[in-house]
Amino acid sequence: MDKWYKMDERALNHQETLLYYDGPQLIVARDQVGQDYVCLLREVSEKNDSFFCVPISKRKLELLLSGEIDLRGIFENPEVATIYEAVVYDGDLLHIPTHEIDKTQLSIDWLPGHDLYLEQQDKSTDRIVRESKDRQRAVISCTLNPPEAQHESKISVENLIEGIGLYQRVLKYAYQKALQSIKQMNDVLKEILVAPQNYQLEVTGVSDGSFTIHMQTAANADMFGYSNIARALEIVDAVTNNIDDTEESFNIISKYSGHFATAYKDLLKFIIDKGVPFSYEWSMPQLQKGISRKIIPRQAKPLYEELTKRTEVGIEQKKFVGKFTRLDKSGAWKLLSDDDQREYSGTSNLPLAGTIFQTQRYSLICEETLSVNPITQKEISKLHLISFTQIE
Amino acid sequence: MVYYIQVATCPKVWKGIIYMDINYKWIEDPLPPNCPPDDAINPNNMAFYRLVASFPPRREDFYSLRKIFPNKKPYNNQDECIQRSCSLFSTYNACDFIRKTFSRHNTKKIVKITLPPTCGLIKKTCSKDNHYSWWMIKKFDPIPYCQEENG
């Protein structure tokens, strides 16, 4: 082994054990200037343990820890094309002498197998539980780990707005779907529950590391510490919890379908296209333990592809009752809704000749599709008439 | 010979009544103070997975590194009690992950071992859901409790 290396003054300090089996097998260590290394145990003897180490950026380390990138890739294609041997003498993990290895002298036998991903570990949610009780609201923290955070904690404005905006949109439609499942709702309760403050989030701060945005609900929790946004979060949690099981997560999304499915699909697309692992944790005052979930691009892809293939899941049907105020030969129409006295417009492939406007009331079933401006997050609704009947 | 002994016999470790050899000794005697820890439990026929050199395994396959290398110094920032235990996994996949990750384990077999109450104590350690430390009773023979697993 002496032949392979050049002497180096570098010494590493053990930071974390990632795999333990009768001793540390895979560790994270740091040198004197704060550079992190991932080190893989190669040999164990009575006197010392020998590790192979590669320098790793903070972002790539997070990707490794979150199971986004495989272990072999870290060593096979290191960010800095240098491999070190670190030797732990007499169990001293706090000062591990390290020297560079001539890679050409190494066979590939020592590399980890293909497609091995570290398991995600549950992290403590104590902070968010405490904060939620202090604020008496639901509290949510979203963490994004974009490529620009590779060397320092930063995020592009575009990615920040889009990521958080998409998550807010998912919550909005999950909340609306949750309300639809409430069987009996009197007018007073309905007025309370449909208020946007229930699902709208306010940013309360950011923190370092991966880019983490701390948010709270606009509305206070009730006297029992329950926040209505929990109705939405439970739906989102259920899907995200099954993200590795495409069939199951797709079934849950299908159950709610419509705009919720589209919003969730758009969030997955963002995660995949931008290569941004996305995680969130939340709590409300009545909970003793927070809930955390994570979606990484590798997990997002199969579900996104399924949702793209099965477009019917994203269709949202809407019913209107009112009077047509405009009918064109092209199929364009406008309707004054009895419900909210607003005018809605849309398109149709149905024959509209003979339809009476201004005076006759109709019941309409439309398909609504939404497109979203990624920067402003403004939604544009398009209605397409599927069927209509005259109300006597 | 098997007896019932009560918590009073060794109150720090043995909570409640368990089966064990009254002349028990740990396979690694003496263990450090407060080892096994207070919250170590009796496995009571729980099943675990471990890498072994061949099947059927040998007793040495269940030795800790410190047992294999008696003069090896303990890692200075790791719990010495855990270093004096045998690592087990509660899932096959976790065990297989180690086998596939490290070339020196590549050719090993995975055994499922169902630990009877007489085997010693276990504890979930290393902040991983599936990693357990096992402090084995010296007279316990693990081999009959092993079966080869292929996933």
Image (tube, coloured by chain):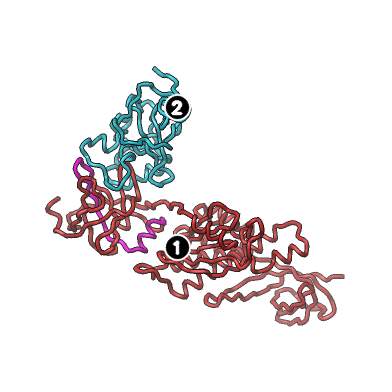
Chain shown red: that is A
Q: Is residue A31 magenta?
A: no
Q: Nearer the viewer, residue B77 or A315?
A: B77
Q: Is residue B81 visible?
A: yes
Direction from residue A199 to residue B111 in the image, left or right: left
Q: Of helix, strand and loop, which one carries label 1?
A: loop
**x 41%, y 36%: residue:** B38
Q: Nearer the viewer, residue A220 or A81?
A: A220
Direction from residue B35 to residue A378 in the image, left or right: right
For discs 2 and 1, the disc positioned in front in the rendered view = 2
Chain shown cyan: that is B
**Location of mark 1 (residue):** A277
| Badge number at residue B7 | 2
Picture layout, residue A183 above or below residue A363: above
Packing grade of label 2 (10 A; few <14, some 14-19, many >=20) is few
Amino acid carrying label 2: it is Val
* On-image quarter of the N terminus of chain B: top left
Give the percent coordinates (x, y) of residue A150: 36, 67
